[in-house]
Image (spheres, rainbow, N blue to C red):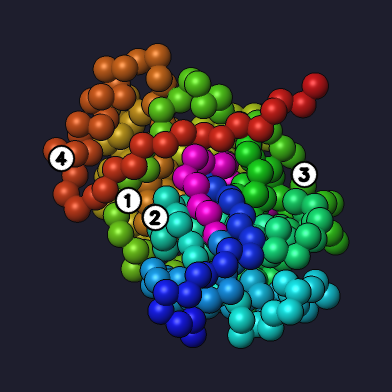
Amino acid sequence: MSLRGEQVAVLGSGKAHGACSLLHAAGLGYGASMALDLPVAVRLLDAPSKRELDDPDGLLDGVLEAWVESGNALPEGKTLEDLHWAVASKIPPRQGLKSSAATSIAALRALCAATSTDLSDAEIVGLSVQAQIKAGVTLTGSVDDAWACATPGWKLIDPQAESIEEGVLLESSGPNSDDWYVLVICRGDRTQKPEIEDFVPHQNTFQKALGALQEGRELVALTWNGRAMLGVLGDVHGRKITNDSLLNGARAAGISGSGSALVVVAPKVSKPTCERLKQFFETRVKGVNVVETSFLNSEAPE
C-alpha cells in the first residue's frame, strides 16, 4: 500500500459507454444492443485509489486474468500485485445497462494505453467476453453487449460464430440521436437472474424483435424484446410502467438486459410528449430514478 502523501501514478486510462438491449441473446441465440451516452472511464494505477472500488463480482480481476492468459504484457516493471483500478461511471450498475461490459472494455483500453499495446475493437471485445465469463456476470458471453459498449450504433451478433469478427451479422448506426429522446427508468439492482429455460416460452416474441431488427426497425425491436423479457422475468410492475409509457406518447419502451432498468424513447420533435413522460415518471411512479440520455450513433456506411 502506498505511503500517505505519496503520488499515485496513472499508468493508463480507457473509456467506454453503456448500452440497452434490442435483442437478448438468450432468447434465440442472437443478440443486439444499442450504444447509449452513459460514459465510463477506468484508470490503471500503481497504488490503491483513495476512493473505494465497487467491484463485487471481481470483474477487474477477470480483466487482468484474461489479459495475461492471452499473452499480453503487464506495464513495465509491474506485477499483478502492483496494479490497482479507479472507475468513474455514469452507468447505473446491475440494472441491465451493460455496466460490466462497459467497465471491462474501458479497463482493457487502459491496459492497452499502459503497455503501448495496439488491439483491434474485435480483440478487445473478445477479451471483455472472457473477463465477464470469468467473473460470472453473463449468461451468454455478452458479445453483443461488449460490441455496443466499445463502439457506437448496434450490431446483430451470433455468439456461436468461430470468431468475434465473423459473429457480426448486421450492423447499423442506430436511431438518430438528434431525433430521439431517451429516458432510462432505474428501479434499483435486479432482484433475480433468469435461467436459460425461462426464455423458451417467449421465443415467438423474441422472433418478432429479431424480425424488426432485420428490417431496420430498432425501436420496434426494443419494444418486442422488452415484452419478451418482462415475460421471462414475470415483471408485472415493469409491464405496467412500459404500457403507461406507450399510452403517454412513447414511441418505444422496454426492459434492458435481464432488468431492472426500463428504456423509454420519444420523438424530440414533440416536446410536450417528452415533458409529459418525464413528469409522469417523477410524479406517478414511486421508487425510480430517471436518467436522461441519448443514443450514440456510428457513422453511416457509405
Residue at 40% x, 71% y: name it. 50
SS at mark 2 in the image: loop
Residue 119 percent coordinates (x, y): 80, 56
The total number of labels drawn is: 4
Amino acid found under the numbered disc labelled 1:
Cys
Q: CA distance from mark 4 to mark 3?
A: 41 Å
Amino acid found under the numbered disc labelled 3:
Leu
- Residue tagged 2: 92
The answer to whether residue 264 is above or below residue 72 is above
Q: CA distance from mark 4 to mark 1?
A: 14 Å
The answer to whether residue 61 is above or below residue 141 is below
Image mark for residue 284: 4
- Residue tagged 3: 169
User: Which tag, 1 or 3, sits closer to the chain's start?
Assistant: 3
Residue found at the far top of this picture: 269
- Few, some or many C-alpha atoms within 10 Å of disc 1 (few <14, some 14-19, many ≥20)? many
- Few, some or many C-alpha atoms within 10 Å of disc 3 (few <14, some 14-19, many ≥20)? few
Describe residue 296's horizontal placement relative to residue 164 as left or right.
Answer: left
Describe residue 81's horizontal placement relative to residue 231 as left or right.
Answer: right
User: Which tag, 4 or 1, sits closer to the chain's start?
Assistant: 1
User: Which tag, 4 or 3, sits closer to the chain's start?
Assistant: 3
- Residue tagged 1: 186
Q: Nearer the viewer, mark 4 or mark 1?
A: 1
Residue 174 lies in what quarter of the image?
A: top right
Determine whether label 2 and label 1 are within 8 Å by CB.
yes
